[in-house]
Image: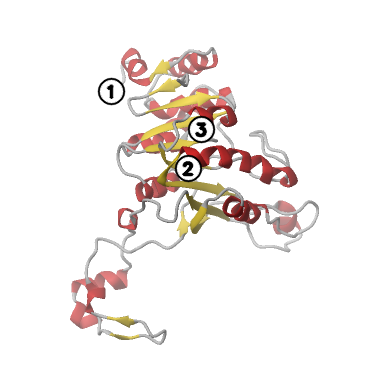
Amino acid sequence: MLKAAYYTRLGSAHIGNSKDLIPLLEDNSVNLFFTSPPFALQRQKEYGNRDQHEYIDWFLDFARLAHPKLRDDGSFVVDFGGAYKKGIPSRSLYNFRVLLRMVDELGYHLAEDFYWHNPSKLPSPIEWVNKRKLRAKDSVNTVWWFSKTEWPKADVSKVLVPYSKRMKKLLKDPEKFYRPKSRPSGHDIGAGFSKDNGGAIPPNLLQIPNSESNGTYISGCKSVKLKAHPARFPAKLPEFFINMLTEPGDLVVDIFSGSNTTGQVAEALDRRWQAFELKPEYVAASIFRFLEKNSEPSDLKEAYSRVLEGESLEIESLRTQYSLPI
């Protein structure tokens, strides 16, 4: 059994190399792997990214271990940031090479390709965008949705987006704003198009700003003077895929959990979860996500230190000890 750094009613966070931890999962048990590994950047980052040339083989080692752990209707969703080749304004294809090898060599299926647009991302890379002004701002990540078989569990009706103003007018008075007809494309659009389904089907371009600055994790890090994880993704990103690809009680696993956004979202959505992270300090600080924003700095610091010292902390007991609502 995996020793947890901390655990809740639904899940647990673990310190260690995912190459050692993934094999400990039961075969055919995971409904969704959702993760964002350190990207293959030219400049080394403190969170441990790899050189582009060795990156693909490195990542595939983890994906190979994960495949038998997935249920037959399970999914493996991975977020990759883009990168440039060293010294020239030419893009690396590492994320696309990962995609091809996942399918051709490991037996995964590409269920769909998604693209995460972060409108709040700062202009980068500095050399090609800010200084020489040769390229546009790189603000879109590729998010590959892989599946173990051709028929993964999925329900897009769980992630509908609000209707446009025009669609709302149509739904309010279909006869005034809509006449069924054939479009130039040849598609025959009938009166059923004016049915209110509770929202519109989302596109595979997800526009989600990554600008959270005062949640429980950030405020916790600030209160105890710790540097937050430098490469966090917004909660709405895993929320979209967890809602679409899993049901309450299903198991979600993040094998590069960082500050454990995935675990926090899974907990809130009543999914079981496990989070694996190599760096103890990242796991220790991620416990702030499961405590209250009004926690005393001394309590947060104590919880952080106890994780680093190797204790296995139960969140419910901590909240009782710190007199926080359970």
Residue 286: image location, x then y, percent: 48, 28
Circle 1: element type:
loop
Circle 3: element type:
loop
Residue positioned 23% across, 75% down in the render? 192
Crowding at dot 2, Cα within 10 Å, few <14 / some 14-19 / many 20+, comes out as many
Residue lying at the far right of the rendered structure = 87
Query: Disc 3 or disc 2, which is closer to the eye?
Result: 2
**Spatial separation of the CA atoms under disc 3 and disc 1:** 22 Å
Q: Are marks 3 and 2 in contact (CB under 8 Å)?
A: no
Kind of residue sitting beneath label 3: Ser
Kind of residue sitting beneath label 1: Pro
Residue positioned 54% across, 48% down in the render? 79
Mark carried by residue 245: none
Residue assigned mark 1: 325
Q: Quadrant of residue 39?
A: top right
Residue assigned mark 2: 34
Q: Is residue 248 something that shows in the picture?
A: yes
